[in-house]
Image (cartoon, rainbow, N blue to C red):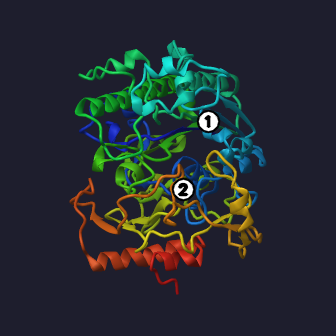
Amino acid sequence: MKAVFVLLDSLNRNALEVYSDKTNIKTPNFKRFQEKCITFDNHYVGSLPCIPARRDLHTGRINFLHRSWGPLEPFDDSFPEIMKNNGVYSHIITDHHHYFADGGATYHQRYSSWELVRGQAIDRWKAEVNPDLDLLKTKYHKTQHHRKNYMINREYMNKEEDFCTPQVFSLAENFLDKNKNEDNWFLQIECFDPHEPFHAPDRFRKLYPNKYDGPILDWPIYDRVKETKEEVSELKANYAALVSMVDEYFGKLLDYFDNNNLWEDTALILTTDHGFLLGEHDWWAKNRMPVYNEISHIPLMIYHPGHSKLSGSRIESLTQTIDIMPTFLDLFNLNIPNDVSGKSLLNILQSDQQIRKALIYGYFGAACNITDGKHTYFRYPKKMSASGLHEYTLMPTRMTSRFSIRELSEMTLSNPFKFSKGLQLLKVKPKVSENNEPLEVQGMTFEDIGSQLFDLSIDKEQKFPIDDPEVIKFLLEEMVKLMKQADAPKALFERLNLKCN
């Protein structure tokens, strides 16, 4: 068996024609793939955002109940490493710069080999000791003046082949040229796009004209929508251009499959880590606000050569990110570790059947969210306090930094968790505001907190919360079961006012 895994970042499901008939974004190659593969209509995130999602992907279990942004731990079972140790060559090609920061440094080393494309977003790439920041700032909207590394990196991207996504797919073609006739390999093609900054070559940007006439504006702030109508239009147009670029280069991969008959013996799976708010609910981006469906309800498309007769079909079963890991292990006939709570999706490709009643997802320190595919419920603490909230880890790093000496001086040891292989873990207080409120990964507070229930059958856009005690009772019962399955700390049940007995 051979498999190619295309992992994109921040892909809003509603941007794709495959999932929305209202989008104006041109994505003919995603549509082309939909006609070849099996499309999942109820696929959701697990832990958020980028690196927590990847920990779910690697381990097949939820981690936001115990940890914020952090590395793979010594006790974590990583599927590309399991492959590597069992005769399946695993390779990753990526421009995801978070892998090379403190909070993500253990991921790429789990593969047999890896390649990094430099220069994406705020990657610390080019060494300019004394850049002319005043000159650079004249080119950008004032809300982006703090993005020093991005402004420098962009100066070195003058031709389309200088952009990261074209380089990632070019390297993927090199891998396939060398290895397409070999057996037992796994290739992960991972693009940071369409994550912000929304910087695409001019030929894609020209597909989405508007009336904005100002400096570069391609990186929305993680905040409420405060921009002018023209600025909003510009940000959305730049996102659309980036999605169209990703679509075209994904199409080149499909061409390669066509021209080399890879459809006969190679699986191809495409998904994203999470979505992105583009002004919906009056918010940009992610992290701070409730986990609306634009963030949580994500694309998943699977082509399996053994199920090619099912091309164009769709799956309604409720699935999520933690199912990817056991699916790949199952694909290569490898044993799935006992710690895995995700389900192999190979079992439902042929027969669409229920594999779970509900699933939970969220950010560390915020709500525990749940959906059964019919309703979504955001369960927040009555008081947004960090009291009783801890991070459990053996590797005390966060997004771009190590835990401070002060934080570590107050640590204690926890009892082992089911997944920690008998090890006690460091029990450390989370990052908090002056009011002792937990902070999201970039140090901002969570906003619009308050438990809410939505009926997706009549309100897919989640605009109108409802009150239905029976539905809430059912969802809370399922939430408790799923939190117990994940061996959530007992203090979390108390924090969310849940009975764990």
Q: Is residue 147 above or below residue 275?
A: above
The secondary element bearing badge 2 is classed as: helix
Residue 47: percent from left, percent from top = 52, 57
Mark 2 is surrounded, within 10 Å at the Cα level, by few (under 14), some (14 to 19) or many (20 or more) other residues, namely many
- Please name the residue shown 33% across and 75% down the image: 472
Quadrant of the snapshot with the N terminus: top right
Q: Nearer the viewer, residue 302 or 195?
A: 195
Tell me the amino acid under the disc marked 2. Asp
Residue 187 visible, this orientation: yes
Q: Which residue bears the numbered disc 1?
A: 97
- Please name the residue shown 61% across and 26% down the image: 172
The secondary element bearing badge 1 is classed as: helix
In screen coordinates, is 78 left or right of 240? right
Mark 1 is surrounded, within 10 Å at the Cα level, by few (under 14), some (14 to 19) or many (20 or more) other residues, namely many
Residue 468: percent from left, percent from top = 25, 75
In screen coordinates, is 484 left or right of 279? right
Q: CA separation, marks 2 and 1?
A: 25 Å
Instruction: Point out which mark residue 389 bears.
Output: none
Q: Residue furthest bottom?
A: 501
Tell me the amino acid under the disc marked 1. His
Residue 368: percent from left, percent from top = 45, 66
Instruction: Point out which mark residue 323 bears.
Output: 2
